[in-house]
Image (cartoon, grey):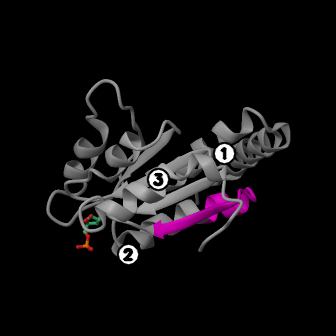
Amino acid sequence: MADANALVIVLMGSKSDWDTMRQCDEVLTKFDVPHECRVLSAHRTPKETSEYVSGAEARGVEVVIAAAGGAAHLAGVCAAHTVLPVLGVPMESASLKGMDSLLSTVQMPAGIPVGTLAIGPAGARNAALLAVAILANRRPELRERLRQFRAEQSAKVLRETLT
Ligand code: RP5
């Protein structure tokens, strides 16, 4: 999914993360945010990861989203290679239910920040929404769409009935 005009790049450490991260892709698509999703691993493809992230700013990317599970250092590695905002999404893991991913992603030493979202699907969707909010700082039409999304979400909750 390459997009020469991508404003957001979505990286994941393995194709096994895609089932969760497709939700991030769906939200960005819903907001018509040009983006691309790619599998790159901090430990399996370290050189390609550093090259890809290092070149992101020059090609116009504004936000990096990185998802990984287990000893999840992908977001931290991305943050080490760019000054763009990096949002980390901890993947739910088989052995520790994502607590390993969460702690690996969130516990960045001072100086190289990673904005860490919730474990799993909620984190995947919220990473996209937070990326939209960041982009919306300089794009009034996107901010309006974000307001509309929130209003629709509220209306849906208020329509709920319990039978
Ligand atoms: C991490 O290891 C990936 O982000 C994935 O969540 C986890 C397991 O990867 P696979 O063994 O399924 O490829 O690097």
The residue that disc 2 covers is 15
The residue positioned 74% from the left and 47% from the top of the image is 149
Residue 108 lies, in percent from the top left, at 28, 34
Q: Is residue 55 left or right of residue 16?
A: right
Establish if 38 lies above or below 6: below
Q: Specify the quarter for ligand 1.
A: bottom left
Q: Is residue 60 left or right of residue 145?
A: left
Name the amino acid type tagged 1: Val
Q: Is residue 44 left or right of residue 142?
A: left
Residue 136 lies, in percent from the top left, at 73, 38
Name the amino acid type tagged 3: Val
Task: Report the Cα–Cα distance between label 2 and label 1.
Answer: 24 Å
The magenta stretch is 26-38
The residue that disc 1 covers is 132
Task: Report the Cα–Cα distance between label 3 and label 1.
Answer: 19 Å
Q: Residues within 10 Å of mark 1 (few under 14, many from 20)?
A: many
Q: Earlier in the sequence, mark 2 or mark 3?
A: 2
Please check the rendered image and state whether residue 37 is part of the magenta-colored stretch, yes or no: yes
Q: Is residue 66 left or right of residue 162?
A: left
The residue that disc 3 covers is 53
- Is ligand 1 within 8 Å of the beta carbon of the residue shown at mark 1? no
Secondary structure of the residue carrying tag 3 is helix
Q: Residues within 10 Å of mark 3 (few under 14, many from 20)?
A: many
Q: Nearer the viewer, residue 108 or 82?
A: 82
Q: Earlier in the sequence, mark 3 or mark 1?
A: 3
